[in-house]
Image: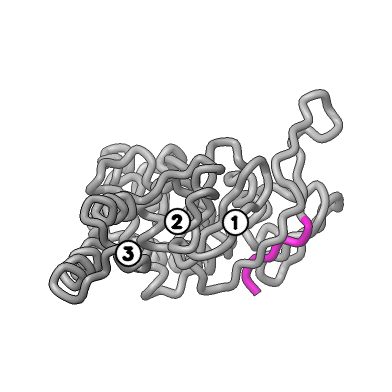
Amino acid sequence: MGIQFEKVNFKYAEGSVRENTALVNIDLNIELGSYIAVIGHTGSGKSTLIQHMNALLQPTSGTVHILDKKVIGGKKNRNINSVRRRVGLVFQFPEYQLFEETVEKDIMFGPMNFGVSKEEAALKAHEAIQLVGLDEDFLERSPLNLSGGQMRRVAIAGILAMDPEILVLDEPTAGLDPKGQLEMMEMFHNLYENHQKTIILITHDMNDVLKYPKRVVVMNKGKLVFDGGPLELFSKRDLVKKYQLELPDLIKIRDEIENKLNLTLDKTIKNVDELTQAIVKVLGGESHAR
């Protein structure tokens, strides 16, 4: 089992005058080996949802199954700290949490905090720094003397050093330039494809939603309002408009070409090469005019 929500509700400041309902009757099952995006406008409940995935927040009512642990709303849930090693949560701007004098010590901190020996933690630091695409020479440097993108990678290496089965990412490319964003997203794709990590991604970038995850969950006012594939989501234009979502650039371009040339193109297109091939096929082959 990966992560399963059963009738989960959550309220901030419950019982006070500032009480705020953030999650409403959530049913959601995420299997190990998934790559899923969680999207929705600001305040829709995305961040609250993912903070339940490693028990950083616990439900007001309902149950969250996290791997082999059960977190029951309204009860004192004991012995759940281990899920925070197995489900790594990467916040926006995780580099703000760097504090040690060397990169190596920063990466070692998490594993040692969960009882790993200093020697083993050092080995994990060497493995993790390579997973995030940095040379081992970085281990001896001060994290405060790195570029923003390098600091982000070091912070993520600190999570990976704990060898989580599930990686939960809250806007991981925020503040990076386009090149850094692409490198970061390709790194997560590599962790999914080649290192069997389950990836759960919060993002506002619909281009990434189209390109990387296999499944998309849309949140609105604390409710789960869509659960399906990216192409299915973007084909539902009334839903996209209702929940104030953007279309990916590729789909906008495809729509524009269809309208201007009076063509019908393949709706499963997910990259520029596929779009180019579809246009050539239509223009060079039999008529597909609408």
- State how far apart marks 2 and 1 are (Cα): 11 Å
Reading the chain from its start, which is encountered first: label 2 or label 1? 1
Q: Which mark is residue 234?
A: 2
**Residue extent of the magenta highlight:** 1-7
Amino acid on which disc 2 is placed:
Phe
The residue wearing badge 1 is 226
In the rendered view, does 274 fall on the left or right side of 171?
left
Callouts 3 and 1 close, C-beta under 8 Å: no
Magenta part, dominant SS: strand
Amino acid on which disc 1 is placed:
Phe
Q: Please determine whether, in this image, residue 153 is positioned above or below residue 18.
A: below
In the rendered view, does 31 fall on the left or right side of 174?
right
- State how far apart marks 2 and 3 are (Cα): 11 Å
Q: Is residue 3 magenta?
A: yes
Q: Nearer the viewer, residue 248 or 98?
A: 248
Residue at image position (68%, 57%) is 81
